Amino acid sequence: MNISRNTSLKSYNTFGIDVNAKQFISINTIDELRQVLKQNYSGDLFILGGGSNMLLTKDIDAIVMHINILGKRVVRKTKNSVFVEALAGENWHQFVLWTLENNWGGLENLSLIPGNIGTAPIQNIGAYGVELKDTFVSCDAIDLQTLESISFSAEECEFGYRNSIFKNKVKGKYIITGVTFKLKKKNHVIQTNYGAIDESLRCSGISDPTIQDVSKAVIKIRQQKLPDPRVLGNSGSFFKNPVITKTELELIKLDYPEIPSYEISRNEAKIPAGWLIDKAGLKGYREGDAGVHKNQALVLVNYGNASGKEILLLAKMVQEKIKKQFNIDLEPEVNIF
């Protein structure tokens, strides 16, 4: 366990926002986690994982607990499946690569998503037609009040689009320590019809892709479209893709017949938020060091020294512009503190 005071969190959040933590504790084991929680701190805690899905707008006047608990293992195998557990501090993408090295299918479309295992269920991360919930079995978590370990099934997590029970009913009550997934050992289900995966595979001359081929295609697409947070501060997709009724969609098509959409139910469709922002003329927009990325309008970026408040002001301007032009409310995907 490592403890420090007045610690900069610039290197602990992918936006690269330079704010300070009153006290910073790096937690390396579940026993250390319980030890810190047992001291109570009057509930004055801020839980930090990979820092990839957050925007920090001010100094954290609380004890920041950086969950750095590492480990992954095979829980059990069946004829067609393998159950694997990864602990909360494991890097998500490195975990995905490990599953692919073992030829276990299910997570390939989620390659190169930033962040750690422990925060993945909170957000129900997803990309290219796949969500975490599709392979999720359960997660273990520590109850902050009782310090007991509890397991949540997929049903109990109440997963939704970039949503879960951990963002709503039990927000701030548990710390996830590990996640178990069910992956396929064979007869892999290849999903390539979302986004540009098919096109990327065709350009590479691949007609019968493996799960490894899909992962490489996803990585290539993401690297072409999305800035590397190690080079240009960002938190990936800043806004959720809005879901609107088909009636609302038809009204928008009167002015924008080319608007892309994805049917998600009999009466609803999902609209790419990046398309809306691009159509509003905001792709590449910059105000000081806060900007909308030039290649992917869904990504807000820190060109160097933007504050969290400046990024937030930019986000609000984007929301107002989209509301005025399309009568659509954009909801942030990132957590704002």
Image (cartoon, rainbow, N blue to C red):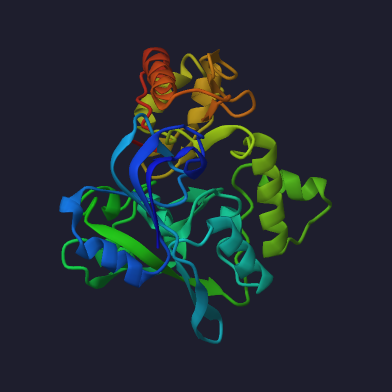
Q: Where is residue 187 shown, x and y percent of the image?
A: 62, 74
Residue plotted at (43% across, 65% down): 28
Residue plotted at (50% across, 35% down): 15
27 vs 248: above or below: below
Seen from the viewer's position, the closer of residues 198 and 291 is: 291
Q: Quadrant of the N terminus?
A: bottom left
Seen from the viewer's position, the closer of residues 290 and 10 is: 10
Let me know if residue 257 appears in the view: no
Q: Please, which residue is most extreme toward the right here?
A: 205
7 vs 169: above or below: above
Q: Where is residue 74 shown, x and y percent of the image?
A: 52, 80
Q: Where is residue 142 shown, x and y percent of the image?
A: 27, 66
Residue plotted at (52% across, 42% down): 11
- Picture quarter containing residue 87? bottom left
Seen from the viewer's position, the closer of residues 165 and 259 is: 165
Q: Is residue 242 left or right of residue 158?
A: right
